[in-house]
Image: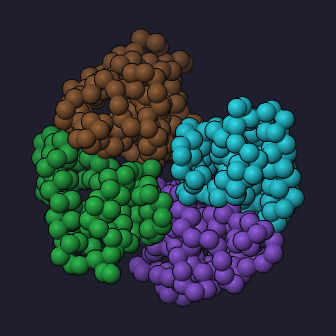
Chain colours: A cyan, B purple, C green, D brown
Amino acid sequence: MDISDEKAAEMLHSLRIFFEENIPFNKVIGLQVASLDLENICVRIDMKETLIGNPVKRILHGGVISSVLDVTGGIVAMAGVIKQMEGRTTDEISRRLLKIGTIDLRIDYLRPGEGEYFLATGSVMRTGNKVSVVRMQFHNDKDCLIAAGTGTYIIG
Amino acid sequence: MDISDEKAAEMLHSLRIFFEENIPFNKVIGLQVASLDLENICVRIDMKETLIGNPVKRILHGGVISSVLDVTGGIVAMAGVIKQMEGRTTDEISRRLLKIGTIDLRIDYLRPGEGEYFLATGSVMRTGNKVSVVRMQFHNDKDCLIAAGTGTYIIG
Amino acid sequence: MDISDEKAAEMLHSLRIFFEENIPFNKVIGLQVASLDLENICVRIDMKETLIGNPVKRILHGGVISSVLDVTGGIVAMAGVIKQMEGRTTDEISRRLLKIGTIDLRIDYLRPGEGEYFLATGSVMRTGNKVSVVRMQFHNDKDCLIAAGTGTYIIG
Amino acid sequence: MDISDEKAAEMLHSLRIFFEENIPFNKVIGLQVASLDLENICVRIDMKETLIGNPVKRILHGGVISSVLDVTGGIVAMAGVIKQMEGRTTDEISRRLLKIGTIDLRIDYLRPGEGEYFLATGSVMRTGNKVSVVRMQFHNDKDCLIAAGTGTYIIG
């Protein structure tokens, strides 16, 4: 009755394509899913001119950071749902994933968004029947913690 | 010892230009400062393909909403500082405005981001010596409340 | 098919008794439901020695403020559910009210908690099928805004 | 130029006495500082009748949890300031500690507050010149994560 690693891997691969290719605004900010399995999710963006929020300091716009952390938390919540639904059909799982959405988000801006690229990670604090709560981190290429967040997602 | 209406108007005009023209990511999302005086701040964005976060429902990306609310709260905090510094020179006020930054942000996603354009407003809950706290709202063109937020800004 | 004013009034009266009399910690802090109808909810506490959080400044403990705002938001969410369930039986409504719980809470501490008594109010930003989002305010006896909050409640 | 271990230990001992003995509301909820050095802070409360928030389920009141997490985050922020002020006099450090206060707090209620006792811990995400940001956790006696939080504290 376990979700096969193969089936999970397939779903996660589809998720990656979906988030990278099918969501227009993710393409605008250049969001890449750097790694994605049921235990580790890592999202990456590369610094570029259009993402700057402070033309003097040349740092990332806070909205880029919150966008990336929101998406990262959502993918982490989705992975949690896939794990929770071990043994269900791909169809059942897909239908549930489609309903997932952000309820609320807290972002803490800790240090200036300086760097050539940035990595966002997250971990589930709770996957319930209706709500998932995720903590996220946003580091730069020097492993400096730029921002952190907490997101609450509706999952059922 | 009052800040002259003229001086305040000039500073606010500069702020508007700065936020609309000089911040690359604001230009990417098409952020416009629709109205801006010491009492009323309104920020607008128009729906466009690149801002979509859900290709099926064709609604705004949550990150666009949080970007706009973060900027709106920041401008509201700046207007609060300008009011607080009545009687000071433009230079003194400008130096203080440059230091303003977001400490943290909470966004509540209430309804799908459907609409042709969106308006964000905000009001100060407290302007202290070091910190300003602002509540923000994000409505669509039918005056439906799409999202709300609270931002804490360092101001001194 | 409307909820009769009488039935709603009865339910709200029961809620008031429940919150004031049956919840031990609410009695510890002296929480009173000062007014309660479907449109206006006001919760009151009186300053007393045991609620102090800073013995030098003799101001309210932040935890008292968050406790009162959490309860206030919960009652506001409950009133929203009662309105939403117009036409249903008291039993159906009661069963749903029993499931309501806080998902998350943000509290902004704006000014020192000085005063002889304090009033907390709140208003619903959205009552969905599963989640309700409420904004709360906490004023002192001089109508000074001491704290504000946002709460997300599971309601179904 | 280092803060001596002895001096830090003395200050932390005073902090412990202060939080346990001198703050009336902490005594009401039975808050104990279970361990306190510059790297590890743990706050404990024991379940008792008066802390109950749901008389049917006999679980902790959400306000007790937020009270404990707020205090825990504050102590963690204080330890961060003591570390940051290595080499300064006890007087200088004490004066700064007295100014520390909560700006805002987010609490995520993850699971029912069941248990005989509860432990709260926290870690600094950033100690700046003006603001400290802390993440907190609240576990029960079975090491189950009951709640989590993030607090922003003014520290200078």
Instruction: Looking at the picture, tell me which residue is in the foreground, D15 or C9.
Output: C9
Q: Is residue B35 above or below residue D109?
A: below
Q: Is residue A3 above or below residue B12?
A: above
Q: As drawn, which residue projects farthest toward the top?
A: D6
Residue in the image at 27% along x and 73% along y: C38
Answer with the quarter of the image where residue D116 lies: top left
Could one spot residue C94 in this view of the protein? yes
Where residue B105 appears, as percent x and y from the top left, is 55, 57
Residue in the image at 69% along x and 84% along y: B116
Residue in the image at 82% along x and 56% along y: A18
Instruction: Looking at the picture, tell me which residue is in the foreground, A75 or C85.
Output: C85
- Total marks placed: 0
Could one spot residue A57 in this view of the protein? no
Instruction: Looking at the picture, tell me which residue is in the foreground, B4 or B153.
Output: B153
Where residue D125 appears, as percent x and y from the top left, is 57, 36
Residue in the image at 54% along x and 46% along y: A129
Answer with the quarter of the image where residue A11 lies: top right
Task: For the N terminus of chain A, give its image quadrant.
Answer: top right
Where residue D147 appears, as percent x and y from the top left, is 44, 37
Answer with the quarter of the image where residue A26 lies: bottom right
Left or right, C13 with reference to D60 = left
Left or right, D121 with reference to B46 = left
Left or right, C67 with reference to B86 = left
